Image (tube, helix red, strand yellow):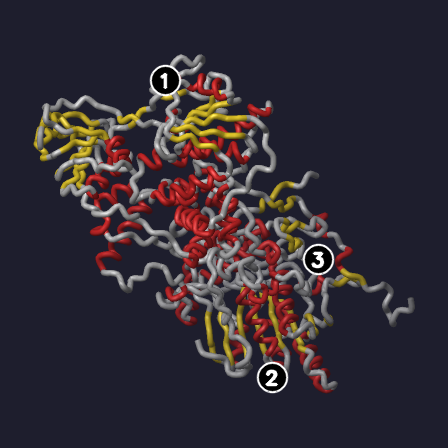
Amino acid sequence: MREGSRDPETPKSGEQRVKLYQTGTHVVGNRLLPPEQRTVQARMDRSNTLTSGHRACQGCGEALGARYALDAAMRAADGNLVAANATGCLEVFSTPFPESSWQLPWIHSLFGNAPAVASGMAAGLKALGRSDTRVVGQGGDGGTVDIGFACLSGMFERNDDVLFICYDNEAYMNTGVQRSGATPPAARTATTKPLGEHAGNVFGKGKNAPLIAMAHEIPYVATATVAELRDLESKVERATRMRGARYIHVFVPCPLGWGAASRDTIRIARLVKESGLFPVFEAVDGEVTSVSKIRRAVPVVEYLKLQRRYAHLFGENPREDVIEAIQAIADRNIRRFDLLATAEEGADLPGEATDAADLPKSQPGIAGRTEQESNLMRLLAETHRGSQ
Amino acid sequence: MEKPFAITLDVGTSLANKTGSWRTERARYVHRLPPCNHACPAGENVQAWLYEAEEGGDGYERAWRKLTADNPFPAIMGRVCYHPCESACNRGELDESVGIHSVERFLGDLAIEEGWSFEPPAETSGKRVLVIGAGPTGLSAGYHLRRLGHDVTIRDSGEKPGGMMRYGIPRYRLPREVLDAEVARVLELGVELEAGVAVGNAEEAMREGGFDAAFLAVGAHIGRRAYVPAGEAARIVDAVALLRSMEGEERPMLGRRVAIYGGGNTAMDAARTAKRLGATDAVVVYRRTRERMSAHDFEVTEAVEEGVKLKWLSTVKHADEGKLVIEKMELDESGFPQPTGELEELEADSLVLALGQEADLSLLEGVSEIEVSDGVVQVADNMMTGHDGIFAGGDMVPDERTVTVGVGHGKKAARNIDGWLRGREYRPAPKHEIATFDKLNTWYYAEAPRVIQPQLEAARRSKTFDEVVSGLDESNAEYEARRCLSCGNCFSCDNCYGVCPDNAVLKLGEPGELYEIDLDFCKGCGICVAECPCGAIEMVPEEI
């Protein structure tokens, strides 16, 4: 893992190595950790930038992702943060006039121009000499990957001082689940019906917004999911402290649009990363600097079968050919982003210590023992296990 | 108020919009019964004391106090208990079960080192209870009765208290300093001990001493004798007597080659003791196979490491001076051993019989309404015999015969005796549903292999009575405690507080009162339930 170039004083993603068992750093908080090492979401004084009473569906991944990201950005910016929001679910469920769920300065924009509005805000703040106020632009995948893409690319190309966060739920959910440029192959949407030989969305060439952002060679690009809070928070905090154009792409399941149980939102986000379908990484100046390794590898089927948008692949006439093609996408990601951990690296989340060196010192070391004895210990341990 | 151009409404917050009204199910915090607690014969609240121990430092004393609320002997228990808790531990399905016994032993040893003592009872009842037998069962009953405020006198025929913990369990498994320290702590609580006093008749002793109730826990000290045809010069001893004599001045003479007849834990203890007394050969003769031995696997393994030999499918046909005649057996379809008629000789200077133990029930002769069957006293659910006011437990009643079961009997009997003395029946609190593995979300637990307790080298083990297994130290005890999954009981991981898309989980920030569902905004999505690592939240339908 190489060190990022522009912000030597800020911790790199996952720098916080916590040697703590029971749950390590996988959970939101931990009573055994000192408060300053807990996540933003574990704090009683978190900003709750998106507060209760919003009208998102039960189990909305986007509502969760937005609060995770903006609360972390608020902490990194010491509360000095403004946001521009593209039209979409995130806006409609949070701000039906005259109510708003936002607890930070927040401006509505059109579906297609949120990056441009955010650029303007950054330029205005600079002109006013208030560059300490940080600017976030945010939107769904429709507003980012499709409709707002020209503005986003311009913002990147000019290296405007904006952190743009895309909450990717893989379709136009607000208007009734129509296909977007981020909709994955074979997924059912209102405009890609599960009918005929090529049911669901086409296997296209794809439109991978994080990779396109990297091609702009902007200072910082990262992907994250709502299943890995510590990883998401550390990326947002790092990005907030940097200057120039930054982009974070957050995977947020949509229970309604994907036909998934509302309780499974985080589970699905976990599985998309564990299957390799959604690589979680960060890139500095156009180069990948770290990836989240797969911890418990699963075939894509585990991910697909929880969602009715893929139901046409299963059932009486399962489309094994299609499932194989989706698995091939995951396998390519695993290869391309090097998602499998080697034995030395351990397979864990960033922020998690797994090396043998972190075991308690008095763990009977192999050093100082004869080989015979350590074999004996192993035998004993096995015998003991066998008896239980 | 004057509003800007085209604005007709005041700005409001979405907090006015009570989205809780959408809900058809609600999340509810629950406690489920951890499998370790469920499996513990002494009724320890294992998960709860591990929770305290996880914090280390001051947490260890809190853990010890929580533990000793159920079991006054953690240092003993951590050494001699067969830890059914660990067999039940959900972590066993993840990697390896939590080393509960090793943490328990660490806490017990720390308490001895630090000199922690028990809280005396807040008030005394003035009732007097006679406990007969100062083994684990009697001492446990005495301890619990005393903490419940009663005056307790324990009588035991042995020179020193401890019963089978002293006269049955070899020193290399339970050092006597540990036993003495934990027993002394119980006596310091004000439990009266009359050692070296045999009780002839329980009812008379109770009447003469003016006791309000009696608890019998005399154990099972008589080695079962099987008829073994033997020549005049054959040396035959029973295992119970052998182990008891180890506490005396003179070491028993067994000879160089010792055969032990039986397949239980006592047979292993006898064989390992024979080895330590200088036997070159210690051979366990058993009529079935290793899988069918009642001895615990680790005891067999430890014995084999020390050079004890095992002879399966064999019975002793005849014993003579210096040799035994062994008949080979084979298992029939039902797994029962049948003789084959095939004979062989085994050189042995002595034969130790470890064929089970029986209770000496002579103190109940002439006591009315006592029912004895299969050599043990029958008791009701409340541990009372048929005779009003006389309770019984431990090895003399029908149950598994272990130290931990005895301690559990003592506790249960104490609570029932307390209820009986106060004229209000003891009713145990209803048990929660068991926190089975499928109730957990194990994604959240870090990979953490079990700490292995160091052991004395085999070469030294077979010559000395030093303790075989060592304890944990502070750092790895904390680590081992933290491997606990906290099944079914919240351990403040903040997951529910974090994962709610509606901020409808309130963090209260007070100890013991951790989170609350904000029903004004809970939409009933169930994410908190799905992502709770330990299964401490459930969904229940809303009443509509």
Q: Nearer the viewer, residue B78 or A294?
A: B78
Toward which corner of the image does residue B4 lie, by quadrant? bottom right
Q: Check disc 2 and give the amino acid type.
A: Asn
Whether residue B100 sits left or right of residue B421 in the image: it is left
**How far apart are labels 2 and 3 at the CA level?**
35 Å
Percent from the top left, x then y, of residue B29?
Answer: 61, 45
Q: Which residue is mark 2?
A: A159
Report the quarter where the C terminus of chain B lies.
top right
Dot label at residue B405: none
**How far apart are labels 2 and 1 at the CA level?**
90 Å
Q: Is residue A111 above or below residue B379?
A: below
Name the chain letter of the residue that bears numbered label 2. Answer: A
Percent from the top left, x then y, of residue A362?
Answer: 37, 60
Q: How many residues crowd mark 1 within 10 Å: few (<14), some (14–19), many (20+)?
A: few
Q: Which residue is mark 1?
A: B373
Q: Which residue is mark 3?
A: A52
Q: Nearer the viewer, mark 3 or mark 1?
A: 1
Q: Is residue B436 above or below residue B390?
A: below
Please name the residue shown 53% across and 30% down the image: B151
Q: How many residues crowd mark 2 within 10 Å: few (<14), some (14–19), many (20+)?
A: some
Q: Secondary structure at mark 2?
A: loop
Toward which corner of the image does residue B318 lie, by quadrant? top left
Q: Secondary structure at mark 1?
A: strand
**How far apart are labels 3 and 1 at the CA level?**
67 Å
Q: Earlier in the sequence, mark 2 or mark 3?
A: 3
Percent from the top left, x then y, of residue B312?
Answer: 18, 35
